[in-house]
């Protein structure tokens, strides 16, 4: 059993970059050089929120809230998107991802957003995330599968990798 209240979520700062890189490495999420610096720059510009999840003061995970997502339907409708949600394997099943999702949803509500978006990979490595998002009230947006945020047409062949996603939405006015 875990106590989700033991997870603290706060905006990331430049001092968090080594810990964020450590979490990314632990989950085999390869980031290009300067990735977190760019994300923090976008946070300073109001384009995204970079959130860090902490347990007992240790960085346990991170996630992003993109106010201007690359997925055209979300962008067109003004739906922010949770992206790059990662939990260090040493801290899994302790409520880290859920706490970061809640923090993102609260930020979106504070800005007057009525919906939230998220994408999830389709292969088995994303099974826990798929179940988590459904439990949290996210449902497919109805547009089908996307690859790198662009619709996949019937008969089109795409690799089954991290860019093959199902986009999901949640009504933020409903109870969490």
Image (cartoon, helix red, strand yellow):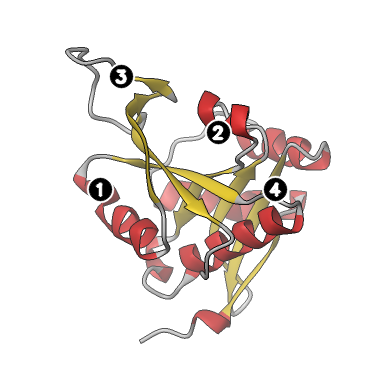
Q: In the shown orientation, is residue 128 left or right of residue 114?
A: left
Q: Which residue is mark 4?
A: 49
On the image, the x and y values in percent for residue 6 come to 56, 82
Dot 4 or dot 3: first in sequence order is 4
| Neighbour tally class for label 1: few under 14, some 14-19, many 20 plus, Cα within 10 Å | few
Residue drawn 61% across and 27% down?
A: 76
Residue 9 can be seen, yes or no: yes
Decide: marks 2, 4 in contact (CB < 8 A)?
no
Q: Which residue is mark 3?
A: 152
Alpha-carbon span between mark 2 and mark 4 = 17 Å
Dot 2 or dot 4: first in sequence order is 4
Q: In the shown orientation, is residue 129 left or right of residue 75?
A: left
Dot 4 or dot 1: first in sequence order is 4
Decide: marks 4, 1 in contact (CB < 8 A)?
no
Q: Which residue is mark 2?
A: 74
Alpha-carbon span between mark 2 and mark 1 = 25 Å
Q: Indicate the secondary structure of the residue bearing disc 3.
A: loop
On the image, the x and y values in percent for residue 86 come to 46, 53
The quarter of the image holding the N terminus is bottom left
Residue drawn 29% across and 59% down?
A: 131
Q: Indicate the secondary structure of the residue bearing disc 2.
A: helix
Q: Indicate the secondary structure of the residue bearing disc 1.
A: helix
Q: In the shown orientation, is residue 2 left or right of residue 101?
A: left
Above or below: residue 64 compared with residue 3: above
């Amino acid at each position: 059993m875990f106590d989700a209240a033991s997870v603290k979520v706060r905006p990331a700062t430049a001092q968090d970059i080594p810990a964020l890189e450590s979490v990314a490495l632990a989950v085999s999420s390869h980031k290009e050089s300067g990735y977190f610096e760019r994300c923090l720059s976008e946070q300073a510009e109001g384009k995204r929120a970079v959130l860090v999840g902490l347990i007992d003061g240790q960085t346990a995970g991170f996630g992003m809230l993109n106010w201007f997502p690359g997925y055209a339907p979300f962008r067109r409708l003004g739906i922010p998107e949770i992206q790059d949600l990662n939990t260090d394997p040493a801290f899994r099943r302790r409520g880290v991802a859920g706490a970061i999702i809640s923090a993102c949803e609260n930020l979106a509500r504070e800005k007057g957003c009525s919906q939230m978006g998220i994408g999830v990979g389709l292969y088995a490595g994303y099974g826990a995330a798929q179940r988590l998002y459904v439990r949290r009230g996210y449902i497919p947006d109805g547009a089908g599968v996307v690859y790198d945020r662009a619709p996949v047409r019937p008969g089109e062949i795409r690799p089954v990798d991290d860019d093959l996603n199902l986009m999901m939405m949640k009504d933020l006015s409903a109870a969490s």
